[in-house]
Amino acid sequence: MAKLSLAKLERHLYAAADILRREGMDAATYKDFIFGMLFLKRSSDVFLAARDKLIKSKIDAGMPEADAEAHYGENPDYYDEFFVPPVSRWPHIQDRLNDASVPFASVLDQALVGLSQSNSTLVH
């Protein structure tokens, strides 16, 4: 995965804020969207890397890929960090971006709820 410089990250964040401002959203609201998306993106990236590493280790030990994915890839017990359920993973969120039948805010809410339900450390 390519590293993102601070300057490029700032440009992306300002561009995202500009888009949301044009939609009539105030700063207090759009910062929640942006920070939520950043949190989901980072959580998903870290999880998917750990998931790939776990599955690869099981395949290297002789387990069929389908079994490794089914028994280890989707089992929260095998992860030291956050378990990110499919509804909270970035590819799922991106796929729903152009789905006009569901508001994008609802997709983000579902992703955050899924993440909190799968990780007791996120619930107060």
Image (cartoon, grey):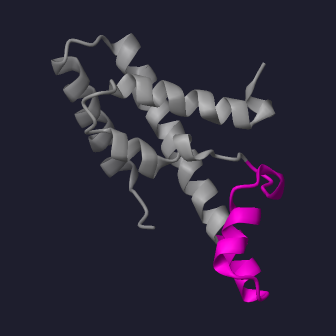
Asked whether 63 falls inside the magenta stretch, the response is: yes
Q: Residue at x 22, y 18 (%)?
A: 21
Asked whether 94 falls inside the magenta stretch, the response is: no
Residue 46 lies in quadrant: bottom right
Find the residue positioned furthest to the right.
77
Residue 11: horizontal and vertical position, in percent? 27, 42
Quadrant containing the C terminus is: top right
Q: Is residue 22 left or right of residue 33?
A: left
- The magenta span reads 53-81
Q: Residue at x 72, y 72 (%)?
A: 68
Q: Nearer the viewer, residue 91 or 17?
A: 91
The relative height of residue 87 versus residue 46 in the rendered view (above or below) is above
Residue 104 lies in quadrant: top left
Q: Is residue 43 left or right of residue 80?
A: left
Residue 20 lies in quadrant: top left
The relative height of residue 18 versus residue 83 in the rendered view (above or below) is above
Find the residue positioned furthest to the left.
22
